[in-house]
Image (cartoon, coloured by chain):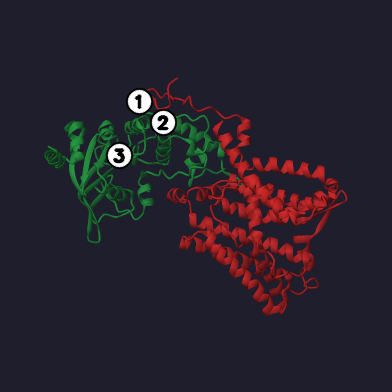
Amino acid sequence: MTTQTDLDVASHKVVRDERVKERNRLQRLLIRPEMGAAIGAVAIFIFFLVVAPPFRTPEALATVLYASSTIGIMACAVALLMIGGEFDLSSGVAVTTSSLAASMLAYNLHLNLWAGAALALIVALAVGFFNGYLVMKTKIPSFLITLGTLLMLTGINLAATKLISGQVATPSVNDMQGWASAQWLFAHTFTIGGVGVRITVVWWLLFTAVATYVLFKTRVGNWVFAVGGDEESARAVGVPVTAVKIGLFMLVGFAAWFAGMHLLFSFNTVQSGQGVGNEFIYIIAAVIGGCLLTGGYGTAIGAAIGAFIFGMVQQGIVYAGWNPDWFKFFMGVMLLFAVIANNAFRNYAAKR
Amino acid sequence: MTATVDRPVEEAPSGGKVPLVELKSVGKSYGNITALKDISLRVHAGEVTGILGDNGAGKSTLIKIIAGYHAPSDGELLVDGEPARFVSPKDALAKGIATVYQNLAVVPLMPVWRNFFLGQEIRKKSFPFSLDSNAMRATTLSELSKMGIELPDVDVPIGSLSGGQKQCVAIARAVFFGARVLILDEPTAALGVKQSGVVLKYITAAKEAGFGVVFITHNPHHAHMVGDHFVLLNRGQQKLDCTYDDITLEHLTQEMAGGDELEALSHELRGKGA
């Protein structure tokens, strides 16, 4: 056996590098980005099964899944954006902006709620486009651009709501046209085996499945990894970098709209100050799920698992009868643990 | 020696003696700075044209003209004997002129096969037109093994390959996507001795398969090993234009090192030291 450098041009002979060993199936599984999160999720699930008896009921699982889904729908889009190498700090308040826009436009212009929702979608996509366009045009890090958008949207949410409705919350819209059908689509509860499950759980799983397909089985997915991994190389081989990145920001806008519609049609009135800080929850869910902060690496399934961990801890603390104030502390621990574990997994599996 | 690269070269110009690419007294200036002046060279099918020069000699400008980034300010660029004017690198690519830059344009975290097809992915023929990953994996494996590189697994991130292997993947990609003329920008600059060997052997293989290769380097040893034809640039001007038979490695090295200037410098330094 020779080394790989002895490549033999004359005889078509292909020479293997004896220093490179083939990876086995187990190793391939272990280096999947979401592996650390999956193991963590199982551990946390068992933990709460043991310490919190009410956690063992199917109703509790439905509640956990609901909590996970509201985070997961956003985390999915945020994860794709992170794989594409960018951040969106405005995603948390953009959810509130969408629901405020839908509610107030429909109420004050006497529109069908669906028309309000459609206008809100335009607003949400426009915010995404604005973020993406500025990031690509100015080359300023998206962290700063979207921090600006975060502050602007926070201010607009509060000020515009007060200006238009004279209060800090939107008026009730559940007697308006289109409520029933929109409520069905975005917020209804259906029963499986006597347990009520929120529709958002279905949407969450569907979005995750679609995002996974797009990431790994389409050209656009390939480009998302490329623009996040090495923007210049991607441009050099003809990937439309600007379009891909602006598209990703708009995807986050779409997800924020969807989450905002759920908020509106499940609570009827919307508090204008909410949503601030949620952007970190989405980013953390994506990171726990194995997305690299530097881009070019991660999966949508990982983000879903990250959101599920969030949902479990959030509800598990309640079921265990502990003070919910501990939630943030646990999440901090989880984040540190997940990041260190993901790192260790990657290194371990890569070295083997 | 048989070549390991067997892409057809039927498109090679009729007559066989017309160069694939020819520069006729090409010059380039940026404002009041003259970067290149009066450069003439020919790239024939099945030949390696070594372009040598120190830093700032104008090598990059020359690549950019052939690759279609810049139009020359003076002179003429001929492809297959016909005058050509490139507006963008895409035009050059369409004529079969592909450039492999030093950074190789690969995304380190992505698998080798995804890098190979990045930007030109193969999709399935029927709905939903998803990526045909098996076809791409198989093609990547077979194209690389034609070059004499076997990877146990094309799913490893390309960042985990050695420098020489990465360079060869980048070249193989250019060849697969229809290049006739390969411009290699300092392919051995960042490589060790063995890795450089891999690349140099591959350059020879590409040449014997009928590709026109432009090999840009500042290493006269590497250039002399594979080159058929040498062009030396110095401060934007052509100092030397000769074939393999006309020049020895010593002469090439000396020219490259600065020739008489170096000798004068040597005398000066020695003189002072004594």
Q: Chain of mark 2?
A: B
For label 1, the residue is B2
In the rendered image, residue B240, in percent from the top left (x then y), is placed at 18, 41
Would you identify the image quadrant in which residue B208 lies? top left
Q: Which residue is mark 2?
A: B147
Query: Amino acid under label 3?
Result: Phe
Q: Are marks 3 and 2 on the same chain?
A: yes
Q: Which element carries disc 1, helix, strand or loop?
A: loop
Q: Position of residue B39 (x, y in %)?
A: 21, 48
- What is the spatial separation of the Cα atoms under label 3 and label 2, in whole angstroms? 18 Å
Q: Amino acid at mark 1?
A: Thr
Under circle 3, the secondary element is strand
Secondary structure type for disc 2: loop
According to the picture, the residue beneath numbered tag 3 turns out to be B215
Chain B color in figure? green
Dot placed on the residue nearer the N-terminal end, 1 or 3:
1
Q: Colour of chain A?
A: red
Residue A109 at least partly seen: no
Asked if residue B196 is positioned above or below residue A212 in the image, the reply reads above
Give the Cα distance between marks 1 and 3.
21 Å
